[in-house]
Amino acid sequence: AQSVTQPDIHITVSEGASLELRCNYSYGATPYLFWYVQSPGQGLQLLLKYFSGDTLVQGIKGFEAEFKRSQSSFNLRKPSVHWSDAAEYFCAVATYSGNTPLVFGKGTRLSVIA
Amino acid sequence: SQTIHQWPATLVQPVGSPLSLECTVEGTSNPNLYWYRQAAGRGLQLLFYSVGIGQISSEVPQNLSASRPQDRQFILSSKKLLLSDSGFYLCAWSVPRSGGAVTTQYFGPGTRLTVL
């Protein structure tokens, strides 16, 4: 069965610093990968997704993610973090069966300090 | 455009009381619908999903149930709430696909449930 691991439970970065959130997946076939962001007390918002094609995917709010098949990873990056980026970030994987639910990682909480 | 609503936004209920949370989707037909729960520090737990009216798949055995009385309405219920039912409940929808095409899930704003 497919699974998603987000190794970092909590990360703290300084405002203006770069960010990388890690995501590793376990799935035998070509995965379909997502990153979502959740602000406190809110629902999840889609940041970006990878289905096929270019392995570097651009998303909203200046985020990007790179799919690396050899490392089974889909890490999320941002070159310069803003205080408003403080939130919980979830990585998810879908199987090639569109009506089944996504499988989510446990999330990484990002704190941003001045 | 499509929108998803959840009602109520917050709820405080005593142990043993019933529960009914509602999720509705606008702007699409025959969506796939999902219920998730977030307990503090425990990520997203899939509770139920539905690919059509009357078709409910349960992922976790518990004292909760789900129903889909209308195409774009998804209800989460309980006859008797437990303390452990406290959490943040999220509804999501996706466009149904045939032939194995993958689709994206979109989430509602959530309902904060506190059981005392």
Image: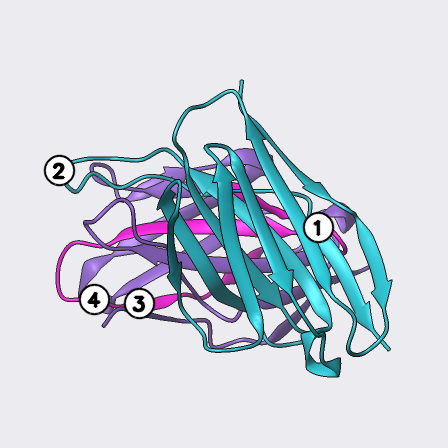
Name the residue located 51 percent from the left edge and 51 percent from the top edge: B67
- Identify the image quadrant of residue A51: top left
Q: How far apart are marks 4 and 3 (CA)?
A: 6 Å
Residue A63 visible in image: no
* Residue on which the image places disc 2: B99
Amino acid bearing label 4:
Tyr
Q: Mark 4, chain letter? A: A
Q: Mark 1, chain letter? A: A
Q: How many marks?
A: 4
* Residue on which the image places disc 1: A16
Q: Give the range drawn in magenta.
A: A19-47
Q: How far apart are marks 2 and 1 (CA)?
A: 44 Å
Give the percent coordinates (x, y) of residue A111.
73, 64
* Residue on which the image places disc 3: A25
Q: Which of marks 1 and 3 is nearer the N terminus?
A: 1
Left or right: where A50 falls relative to B18: left
SS category of the residue bearing label 2: loop
Relative depth, front residue between A85 and B29: B29
Relative depth, front residue between B79 and B107: B79
Image marks 4 and 3: residues in contact by CB distance under 8 Å:
yes
Give the percent coordinates (x, y) of residue A96.
19, 49
Q: Closer to us: mark 3 or mark 2?
A: 2
Relative depth, front residue between A49 and B12: B12
Q: Do labels 3 and 2 share a chain?
A: no
* Residue on which the image places disc 4: A27
Name the residue located 25 percent from the left edge and 66 percent from the top edge: A72
Relative depth, front residue between A83 and B58: B58
